[in-house]
Amino acid sequence: MMRERVVRIEGEPKSNEIREKAARLIAKGHKTYTPTQAVIERAKGVYLWTVDGAKLLDFSSGVLVANLGHNNDYFEMKFQEYCREVPRNAYNMFTPLEIRAAERLIESLNSPKLQRVIWAASGSEGVIKAIWCAQHRYPDRPIMLATRGGFHGKKGLAGDVTGESSPNPNVRFISFPMCDYCDEVDPKDKGKEEVCRPKYEAELEELKRRYPGKICLLITEPYLGAKGSFHPPKWYLQLLNRWCEENDVVFILDEIQSCHGRTGEMYAFQKYGVQPDIIVLGKGIGNGEPVCAVVGRDDLIDSLDYGEGSDTFSGNPRACAAILATLDTFEKFPILENCRRASKVMEEGLNSLREEFDFVKFVRGEGLVWGVEMESDEIANEAVLRCYLQYKSGGLGLHMMGPLAGKVLRVAPPLVITEDEVRTGIELMRRAFREIERNRG
Ligand SMILES: Cc1ncc(COP(=O)(O)O)c(C=O)c1O
């Protein structure tokens, strides 16, 4: 598919100028491809305004970071309060704020295993630190297991456990359920435990046979996000969890994307009924401030000695302030309840699109994280662009990130979206899809 370096949209002079400057000044590799290259000047709640004054409903949450919405008044007030007079420090001192953030986070996780924190400044760094902890704890076990098709970040070890193959000779992949693509079982049996479980058990047992006493960790996500939104049956994650417990393998759950309400529960591990040894939290944990936390068993987190997990920005006071302000906002407002209500409307609405349009192939999701799989990359990209351009006819456009895995539209609005706003978003998608249909003749 042709991916232009600079998108030009008629009637958007200011945006076009910035898009051109961006192409001169900022690395192409710094952004993922989005057919709109939206230039956003201002944001509030679930709305964005472009520099040319177009108003957009945000179905991306800025790539799932702004769970509480943009410029949430309560969050911003608390954030400023916590930030007042804090030092600009790194790893050379403690602040009361840091200790409070760790305490509150551990309280909110409410799991006997998740008792100690190591901070990171981005999701992939958090994953790397989680892996280091397991490796330092069990230095004589070189093998790392990861679920195939997962995304844990692009850097170093996080990149090594991402995808379907790895440059790291110690990484082995195991299958993750992707029921829509599965033709091994009868359609009526897809995802059924009694039918599917033996396949996954056999894979795990085979790895145990091949690497006795050598498997250090297993890392997975509650659902495959970047791969196109594949949400497994609960029994699958529980199977991995139990197998890890029985075989003394560190179970690392990457909740960088799913944490802080995305699935309708504060944490996905609560919804899926698992107890990770280490959890990695990112994105929504600071409502968009750059912060990540790795929380785990004492013996694992403590296996790193002084300085072995430190870096300049991890756990700085502003990051800790953001964690506290986010938790305060979840405590004060019924955000999870809102997410669950909006989720039902979203599910119905997206399924109505699947029924109406042949080119919508699958709808998958939970909470407020959905994937709409289109027939092709071209149609998916055209859909993103046409959704955005709706502002030209009705006054409101729809902002979505570039498709996942080529052709899956990611639908993930802030968790504060109302049911009516979800309906509005679905209608914008419907109008855009009707244009695609008309164009196809
Ligand atoms: C599940 C998951 N893990 C890891 C990452 C990597 O996080 P970061 O981009 O902050 O390094 C992401 C980011 O999208 C993610 O969704």
Image (tube, grey):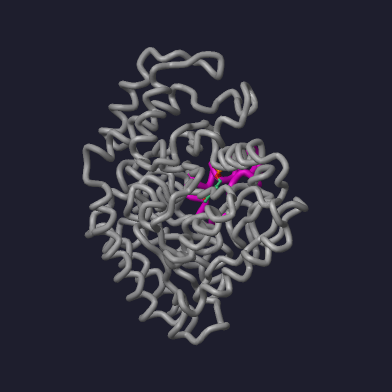
Residue ID at (33%, 23%): 80
Residue 79 percent across, percent down from the top left: 34, 27
Which residue occupies 55% across, 19% down?
91
Question: Is 244 left or right of 83, judged from the image as shown?
Answer: right
**Residue 29 inside the magenta-drawn segment:** yes
Tell me if 172 is positioned left or right of 267 in this view. right
Task: From the viewer's side, name the closer residue of 251 and 186.
Answer: 251
Q: Quadrant of residue 67?
A: top left
Q: With respect to residue 76, does 19 lie above or below? A: below
Task: Pick the residue in front: 50 or 220.
Answer: 220
Q: Is residue 382 above or below residue 303?
A: below
- Which quarter of the figure has residue 21? top right
Q: Name the image quarter holding the N terminus.
A: bottom right
Q: Nearer the viewer, residue 28 or 95?
A: 95
- In the image, residue 266 lies at what x, y percent? 34, 47
Q: Position of residue 24 (x, y in %)?
A: 65, 40
Question: Where does the magenta region start and end?
Answer: 15-38
Q: Is residue 254 above or below residue 243?
A: above
209 and 149: which one is in front? 209
Q: Is residue 262 magenta?
A: no
Position of 31 relative to 320 (above/below): below
Q: Position of residue 244 (x, y in %)?
A: 55, 54
Q: How many marks?
A: 0
